[in-house]
Amino acid sequence: RVTTHWPACAAEGARRASRGDFARFLRIALGSADEAGTHLRIAWHAQALDTPEYHASERLRVTVCKMLYQLIRSLEESDAHTHNSKSA
């Protein structure tokens, strides 16, 4: 369930009116991705995942987290730039 939450949050956030709202939804998706990492570790420790499956899944999760983080950062920098332009 948690893995389907990431794209759902991103999609919902993309439809919001402001970049700040979009970034907020992406932060929620990032939290879900972190939660998925916990579930992966639990499954691996319970031997429900073998080591190669765990490492492959974790690499994909980390890649998604990095992309989400960079998009959030880009949105926040763009929002700050827009705010500073309006103040000047």
Image (cartoon, rainbow, N blue to C red):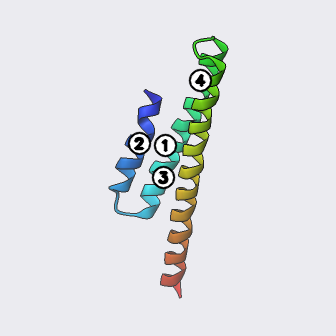
State the image coordinates of residue 25 (x, y, percent, origin top left): 45, 49
Mark 2 or 1: in front is 2
| Residue 53 placement, left or right of 23 | right
Which tag is nearer the camera, tag 3 or tag 4? 4
Say which of marks 2 and 3 sits in front. 2
Q: Mark 4: which secondary structure? A: helix
The residue that mark 2 highlights is: 7
Say which amino acid is labelled 2: Pro
Q: Position of residue 21 (x, y in %)?
A: 43, 57
Label 4: which residue? 53
Say which residue label 3 marks: 24
Which mark is on residue 29? 1
| Labels 3, 1: front one | 1
- Residues at discs 2 and 1 in contact (Cβ within 8 Å): yes
Say few, some or many: other residues with alpha carbon within 10 Å of mark 2 (under 14 / 14 to 19 / 20 or more): few
What amino acid is found at the position of numbered circle 3 in the picture?
Arg
Query: Which of the 4 quarters of the picture holds residue 70?
Result: bottom right
Labels 2, 4: front one? 4
Specify which label sits upstream in the sequence, 2 or 4: 2
User: How many numbered tags mark residues here?
Assistant: 4
